[in-house]
Image: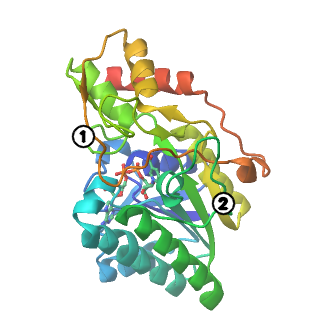
Amino acid sequence: MRVLVTGGAGFIGSHIVYSLKNHNEAAVLDDFSSGKIDNLPEGIKIYRVDVRDRDAVFAAFAEYRPTHVSHQAAQISVSYSVEEPAFDASVNVLGGLNVLDAAREFGVERVVFASTGGAIYGEVPEGEKASESWLPRPASPYAASKASFEDFLEVYRQQYGLSYTILRYGNVYGPRQDPHGEAGVVAIFTRRLLESKPVRVYAREKRGDEGGIRDYVYVADVVAANLMALQEGLDGVYNVASGHGRTTTEVLRAVADSLGVEPEIEWQGVRPGDLRRSVLDVSKLRAHGWQPRVEFEEGIEKTVAWFKDNY
Ligand code: NAD
């Protein structure tokens, strides 16, 4: 396999690159808008390219000639997508189409796409878990872009025979997550508490409640799903998560306990575009032999330890 990882300098992409490079050939395509060169192993081939730049995307494919594409590059902030929906779509839909057209042109066998289980299903009622058979019900421009690109993948399969795997991630956390962005509450809490700063908890329904419920999954488990999709050629759509819901304050408590500090909380109202509850059914991917291996408490310990060493 020769795998081109778009967004490979980012949080999840760089973990995929590290795990690929031992047994396969891998290269990175990234505009470094949030990705970092320090996230990458030495000697890896890098294309410093914005996916919106069609000519540059094609030139990278023409030179590297990947057999597989791991498409992780994206505008990742839900709240920014609410402010700038056209920008979100320009990267997440139109930029993605440049990647798909180049994949088609240069005979790529499979595209694995980082979609969102955390946003695509809309509200998941109490007591339920969203499974892949649920119809997408995007409640933000970010989710709408991801759902739209999923549709394009299916169209390209029908029209051009391009195989794909859609991985709908829950809330991914772990080492190297950007703590300066708006997404990634574990990274944000860890950095703020390490700096002895107050943390914000956005409300689920009203200021002062426990915050939204999300399905948190450790990055190594997400990487394992990506490798399985690439190596075993999984077709279709798969949730990648833990199958358990946790509130924002539960996450904050775990991070604070791991650091041995007492957090100062600035309670916020509901953030536009945020869901109240999202929990995912992961039985479909489990049936293929994948399972989340890192328990939440262990994942938090590992993440906090990494931030302590690197901040
Ligand atoms: P990240 O911001 O760390 O990584 C995204 C990477 O894409 C960065 O390296 C960035 O520089 C690059 N990028 C952004 N715009 C680009 C452009 N126009 N051209 C080329 N490169 C560009 O975020 P992440 O958390 O690692 O997310 C990776 C993927 O997983 C994204 O597609 C995201 O939507 C998806 N996802 C993430 C989560 C999560 O919880 N982190 C959940 C669901 C889905």
What is the quadrant of the N terminus in the image?
bottom right
Residue at the spot of label 1: 180
Note whether 187 is above or below 270 in the view shown.
above
- Tell me which amino acid carries mark 2: Glu
- Tell me which amino acid carries mark 1: His
- Image position of 59 (left or right of 181): right
The x, y position of residue 173, in whole percent, is 46, 37
Asked if the residue at label 2 sits under 8 Å from ligand 1, the reply is no
- Residue in the foreground of this view, choosing between 77 and 218: 77
The x, y position of residue 218, in whole percent, is 53, 36
Residue at the spot of label 2: 132
Q: Secondary structure at mark 2?
A: loop
Which of pointers 1 and 2 indicates the residue nearer the eye?
2
- Image position of 259 (left or right of 242): left
Note whether 222 is above or below 28 in the view shown.
above
The x, y position of residue 45, in whole percent, is 40, 59
Q: Looking at the image, which residue is at 43% across and 79% down?
A: 97
